[in-house]
Image: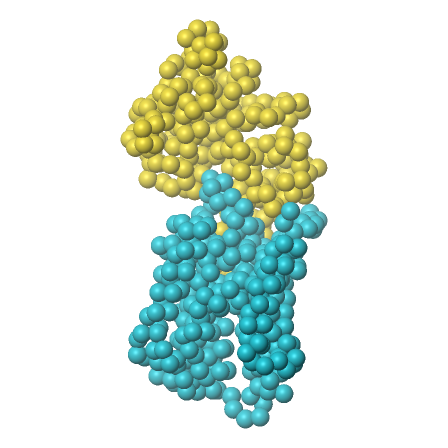
Chain colours: A cyan, B yellow
Amino acid sequence: MDYFYSILILIGIYVVLASSFNLIIGNAGLVSIAHPIFFALGAYTAGLAAIYFGLHAIVATLAGGVVAALFSLMMSLPSLRVSGDYLMITSIGFQLGLLQVIKNVEFTGSQGGLSNIPTPVTGPYRGLVYSVVSLAVAATVVWIIRWIVRGPYGRAITAMRDDELAFLALGRDAMRIKIVIFAVGCGLAGIAGGLYAFYYQYVSPEQFEILASAAMLTMVVVGGMGSTLGPVVGAVLLIALPQAITFLELPPAIMAPLQGMLFTLLVIVFVFIRPQGLISPEGPTPLPGHRQVNRGGPR
Amino acid sequence: MNAVLTLEGLCKSFGGIVVADHITLELERGHILGLIGPNGAGKTSLFNLISGVVPPDAGDIRLNGVSILARPLYQRARMGIARTWQQMRLFHTMTVLENMVVAPREYVAESMLNLVFKPRALRHADEIACEQAMRILERMHLAQCADSLVMDIPFGQQKLVGLARALMNDGPCLLLDEPMAGVEGQAYDTIKAVVRQEAAAGRAVCVVEHNISFIKDLCTSAVFMSFGAILERGSVADLLASKSLTELYFGA
């Protein structure tokens, strides 16, 4: 049963990560792949706050979100002046650079990682409680993001993604919108980090390498970029599928590469056969007095 | 004086290419100024300088007497400099109406704080923008495609949407970059009528256009540009009568 719970918890965490990543990359069109570092910042902040300051898990998790959002400014303020490929390069630099810092300072546990994070829940129901919390957080986050992207704010970020210069020339402050979207998306990733830290009670730097970026990107691409339900489906699928093959009882030497191949294969298949992902964007709420428009995904 | 927008000694060059060579120009209330000249004369570059896409190397730009040189692109738009693009630059995944409602000078939903704390103001702003947009679309005979995605409507209508979106900005200055390129038939007449109405309403309009009959029909005066410099200014008839200019333009 604990195994089942652990999958549910992981699904909850990755739904938050994929959804918030989709907000940045899918809805706002800001091609940053540094999302795992904000996940890491949340996890480390929450863990450290609990170990050194004895903060309650909920407060520590929220602190993780705030710190991740603040660090996002460190990246967004200088690097949002560029976009597209350039933004992607700076984001990789930011991720790898900050990860090096985490690996080399003492108070984060360096290479060995941060262990002995106190758990707020113990006893036989620990798995159940964590699953419920994790899924509830995931549902809330998806609801918040849906609310952001379907209303007038969402219209603005869609317009910005479609043509930033035209958007600016209409009097819209694109920079401010980008900074806010980055802060919100990264803050949510930080909260996912807090959940992670308190469940596993152990955080190590290698979980937040480029491979984690690839996993999150796969979830968003397979699920459907720019749609609110897409990353949810993507996260569930990509957490559940690798678990499913473990039931094949193959030797571990084959298992790990097989899981890696599965991710890669999925991305390739989707890019060729269904580039818009499993779920097409829902589009914004109709304007007053107007009907819902069928968008049918990118053409 | 009725000058809404004043350009004074505006200079800009990209490397060795001079796109603006001491441009001094005034756009006046209620007037339509034509900007003509061969390709590469610096007409669109001049629009980019005015709207703030690129900063000038020297010179000044004043809106109602106040220098706007330090203002970035989006603030100049809010101050009332509306423009269109030769390539339209529509938001292609959005409907015609959605393209319009993100375009007013003030957009309450631009701040996420308003999204949280002022939901009613937001809904109200949406309704007002929607009404304003539908009025403009009706004027341009576009109301029936308000809910179509812009990529689904024909080119001529997309061109109209580009103009309609700029009209959501009700500021004093309107810059139109080749509004007629690729347009014919009813859309042509609509654009002509709308531009005339906007000027009659007191806006200062500047049109870059290769369609000479459009310029002849609409513009009170015109300037002729070549290699970033204004060669001549005056009435459209005078400019067209000038032999040296027609030679420059048509290469005859």
Say whether residue B8 is left or right of residue A32. left
Percent position of residue A54, x then y = 38, 85
Say whether residue A71 is left or right of residue B103. left
Res A131 → quadrant:
bottom right
Which residue is located at x 51 percent, y 53 percent? A29
Which residue is located at x 52 percent, y 20 percent? B210
Res A258 → quadrant:
bottom right
Decide which of A196, A278 is in the foreground and name it: A278
Say whether residue B29 is left or right of residue B138. left
Can residue A37 be seen here? The reply is yes
Q: For the view shown, which residue lies furthest in the bottom direction?
A: A123
Vertical comparison of A106 with B163: above or below: below
Decide which of A223, A176 is in the foreground and name it: A223
Q: How many marks?
A: 0
Percent position of residue A169, x then y = 47, 39
Can residue A144 be seen here? The reply is no
Q: The N terminus of chain A appears in which quarter of the rendering? A: bottom right
Vertical comparison of A70 with A177: above or below: below
Say whether residue B21 is left or right of residue A169. left
Vertical comparison of B56 with A14: above or below: above
Percent position of residue A96, x then y = 38, 65
Percent position of residue B28, x then y = 43, 23
Q: For the view shown, which residue lies furthest in the left direction?
A: B58
Which residue is located at x 64 percent, y 47 percent? A299
Which residue is located at x 35 percent, y 74 percent? A103
